[in-house]
Image (cartoon, rainbow, N blue to C red):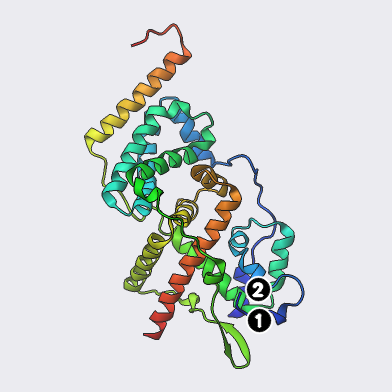
Amino acid sequence: MAMEQSAHKHGLGCREIFAQLSAYIDAELPEATCEEIQAHIANCPPCVEFINSLRRTVELCHGRANAERPSPLSEDAREKLLAAYREMIAARKRGEDPCQPQS
Amino acid sequence: MREHRQKRDRISCRPRFRLQSAIVADKTEVQLARNLLSGDLAAFDRFVETYQTKIFQYSYMMCGHREDAEEVAQETLLKVFQSLDQLREPERLKSWVFTIARNSCYMKRRKSVFAPLQELSLEELMPVAAEAGGQRRIQIADWTALPDDEVLRKELREVLDRAIGELPEIYRAVVVLRDIEELTTEEAAEVLGVSIEVIKTRLHRGRLALRQKLDRYLQNAARN
């Protein structure tokens, strides 16, 4: 990150952390790397601020789920889907029972 | 305040149980797939109700056109019901449906397949540093006070939607699948036909690009 590097002479620096922040907030990092990041951010307020802003961004994205809704299906469209579904189920049953007559 | 924010930031370092090669699906999805395959009409209705919206939202964010997205949603549902018996593993229902939706989207807008790939570099997405009071600080908006006012929150959502729409397609697809539709990394990799590492890289850059645009908006809003 474009922050001072000198304050973090040991362990991971801001730049190395910057590349791994999504994996960090998703808890997808190996335990050792995660702990190194936590040791770093315990003394690095800018990184904490940045991580919180990234996390809020992700939360705002989660809030967009189902935000746009399609028009309700017309009766015709639903009937078409149901016909396809019934046909698939019937074909599946015929496949399972070779004695059943083919339509 | 700072102490509080640092506490909030603490994340458990215990790795979540994950299988690298398998999709760990939620049980209700697996049950839904099994019920569908057994010919349960209630499952048909539940599937249509849930997935029409999911596919529409994904397609709308990928295509950018409401009518195209409505068509993609209906075409996808039809293909799903025509070929549901090809779904060998019920736990893959979600990624299988989104793969069909993704292909329908591509067919809708074939031209974009040939559009040049635009890459986001990490350097461009880093915060700007500035010297203040003998200390280097990053220029960042105050994210602890997101607008309470409904008009401003609506504006923030619009900024986010615009930012998502402006992401290069390869990043947008990952952000929509992972952060909006909440697919797992493994499911998103399966839908997009890329490796788990590619998904992680694109997700991170996509999120950083969104964060940067929201941050600029919040900084401007604080000035005005």
Residue B150 placement (x, y as % from top left): 33, 71
> For numbered disc 2, what is the local secondary structure?
helix
Report whether residue B222 is seen: yes
**Residue plotted at (63% across, 89% down):** B135
Q: Are marks 2 and 1 in contact (CB under 8 Å)?
A: yes
Above or below for B174 versus B218: above
Q: Are there few (<14), some (14-19), or many (20+) residues within 10 Å of tag 2?
A: many
x and y percent of residue A29 in the render? 67, 57
Relative placement, left or right, of B54 versus A57 is left
Label 1 environment density (alpha carbons within 10 Å; few <14, some 14–19, many ≥20): some
Q: Amino acid at mark 1?
A: Glu
Q: Is residue B172 above or below residue B23?
A: below
Question: Horizontal and vertical percent for residue A49?
Answer: 57, 75
Chain under numbered label 1: A
Question: Which amino acid type is marked by label 2?
Answer: Cys
For this rendering, which residue is in front, A101 or B104?
B104
**Residue name at image x 29 percent, y 47 percent:** B68
From this viewpoint, is residue B50 visible? no
Farthest bottom residue? B133
Q: CA distance from mark 2 to mark 1?
A: 8 Å
- Quarter of the image that includes the N terminus of chain A: bottom right
Placement of B7 over or under B30, stated as above or below: below
Q: Is residue B163 above or below residue A65?
A: below
Sequence order check, earlier mark of 2 and 1: 1
Q: Which residue is label 1 attached to?
A: A4
**Which numbered marker is on residue A14?**
2
**Quadrant housing residue A48:** bottom right
Instruction: Judge left or right: residue A29 versus residue B194.
Output: right
Q: Position of residue B176 (x, y in %)?
A: 44, 54
- Chain letter for the residue marked with disc 2 in the picture: A
Figure quadrant of the C terminus of chain A: top left
